[in-house]
Image: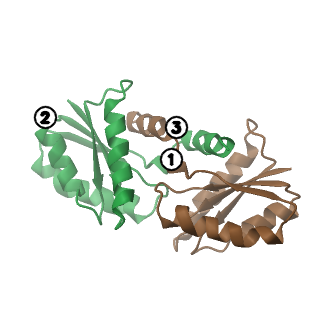
Chain colours: A green, B brown
């Protein structure tokens, strides 16, 4: 059972956090991927932190969790903070395969996304 | 002559700013769009601020500037700060058509980008 855990930075502005929660909900309903659930979580400044997100995946029966940093730049949050939290959590879930992917800003698809957004005037 | 001005937040970490500068350079070289130049700029915390970016576009001969907020959430930077800076600058460039697009986080392509990144393990 595969879970996708989308990790955003988190904001004091609840609407920004809600946008990520909504994004995960929309992704959950899309048919063209092989994740059984898509769960949002935040590095800080929000109610749902990374350990909460991992626990949600575990309770849903996940055997694999793909952790996706929803960040544009390869700053300390991506290179240090998220991996540290995941490394600290892993021993609690010895039966779950937890992997961290690239952050979204590193995707070559970002170039297409920028051009598409720039052309939708 | 069309310019695309990519506006990122800006970071004290120079490497994060450089990633945006590199992204704009890569976009400049891509053939499949109708922008003559792609210019990076930052809202704050960086050497190249929005007025610098607009001036670069103007000096290059731009008659149209598409301003693209390279932001994930619709926070105050997107809804207030960037539009305010652009509105303040416009009178200096009466012959240039300057438009601000949606921020990239609002793009439906973001869903595809997330799934693609999550599947490239």
Task: Report crowding for label 3: few under 14, some 14 to 19, many 20 or more residues within 10 A (C-alpha).
Answer: some
Mark 2 residue crowding within 10 angstroms, few (<14) / some (14–19) / many (20+): some
2 vs 1, front mark: 1
**Residue that appears at 36% across and 37% down:** A26
Disc 2 to disc 3, C-alpha distance: 29 Å
SS of the residue under disc 3: helix
Q: Which mark is residue B109?
A: 3
Chain letter belonging to callout 3:
B
Measure how far apart labels 3 and 1 are at the Cα level: 9 Å
State the CA–CA distance, disc 2 to disc 1.
31 Å
Residue at screen point 17% across, 50% down: A90
| Chain letter, disc 2 residue | A
In this view of the protein, can residue B15 be seen by the observer? Answer: no
Q: Is residue B50 left or right of residue A98?
A: right
Residue to which mark 1 is pinned: B106
Chain letter of disc 1?
Answer: B
Query: What residue do we see at 38% from left, 43% from top?
Result: A23
Q: Are marks 2 and 3 on the same chain?
A: no
In the rendered view, does B74 fall on the left or right side of A111? Answer: left
Residue holding disc 2: A61
Q: Determine whether, in the image, residue A62 is placed left or right of residue A6.
A: left
Asked if labels 3 and 2 touch by Cβ distance under 8 angstroms, the answer is no
The quarter of the rendered structure image containing the C terminus of chain B is top left
Same chain? Circles 2 and 1: no
Using a 10 Å C-alpha cutoff, classify the residue at mark 1 as few (fewer than 14 neighbours), some (14 to 19) or many (20 or more): some
Q: Which one is in front, A3 or A91?
A: A3
Work out whether residue A101 or residue B112 is closer to the camera in this orientation and state it: B112
| For residue B75, above or below residue B48 | above
Element class at badge 1: helix
Whether pointer 2 and pointer 1 mark residues with C-beta atoms closer than 8 Å, the reply is no
Q: Secondary structure at mark 2?
A: loop
Query: How far across and down, in percent of the image, does residue B38 sit?
Result: 73, 53
């Amino acid at each position: 059972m595969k879970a996708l855990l989308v990790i955003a930075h988190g904001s004091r502005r609840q609407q920004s956090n809600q946008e990520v929660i909504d994004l995960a909900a929309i992704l959950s309903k899309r048919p063209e991927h092989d994740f059984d659930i898509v769960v949002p979580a935040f590095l800080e400044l929000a109610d749902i932190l990374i350990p909460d997100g991992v626990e949600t995946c575990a309770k849903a029966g996940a055997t694999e969790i793909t952790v996706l940093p929803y960040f544009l730049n390869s700053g300390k949050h991506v290179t240090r903070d998220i991996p540290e939290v995941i490394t600290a959590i892993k021993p609690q879930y010895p039966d779950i395969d937890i992997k961290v992917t690239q952050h979204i800003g590193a995707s070559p698809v970002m170039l297409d996304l920028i051009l598409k957004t720039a052309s939708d005037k």
